[in-house]
Amino acid sequence: MAGKSTGGKVASTAGRTLSNPNASAIQRSLAGSALAQSGTNKATGKAMEAKASGALHNPNSSATTKQLAGSLTSQSIKKR
């Protein structure tokens, strides 16, 4: 387990993103995953971690997308 959960600020952003009809598909996907992890110890899965990582490395990603993606990558299961 990652031992982290989505914080209130990111959860709020995720909720607003999901209710925004202009949100992109990637934003909706990241927001849904972030909300699913809110208040839990669930970790980000490999597929969602890859999607979030791609969004973080994309120079065209918006600040909202990067905020959601950053939260998800910080909750992923890391092998050290």
Image (cartoon, helix red, strand yellow):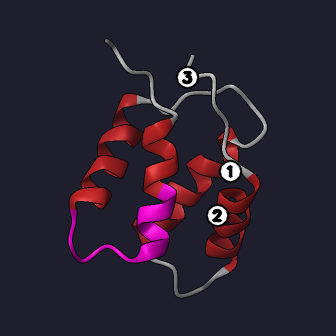
* Neighbours of disc 3 within 10 Å: few (<14), some (14-19), many (20+): few
Dots 3 and 1: beta carbons under 8 Å?
no
Mark 1 or mark 3, which is nearer the start of the sequence?
3
Horizontal arrangement in the rendering, residue 68 relative to residue 18 (left or right): left
Tell us which disc is closer to us: 3 or 1.
3
**Number of callouts in the render?**
3
Give the structural element (helix, strand or loop) at label 1. helix
Q: Quadrant of residue 65?
A: bottom left
Residue furthest to the top: 80
Q: Which residue is mark 2?
A: 14
Horizontal arrangement in the rendering, residue 59 relative to residue 79 (left or right): left
Dots 1 and 2: beta carbons under 8 Å?
yes
Q: CA distance from mark 1 to mark 2?
A: 6 Å
Q: Residue at x 52, y 34 (%)?
A: 75
| The residue stretch that appears in magenta | 58-68
Q: Quadrant of residue 9?
A: bottom right
Hey, what amino acid is under mark 3?
Ala
Hey, what amino acid is under mark 2?
Ala
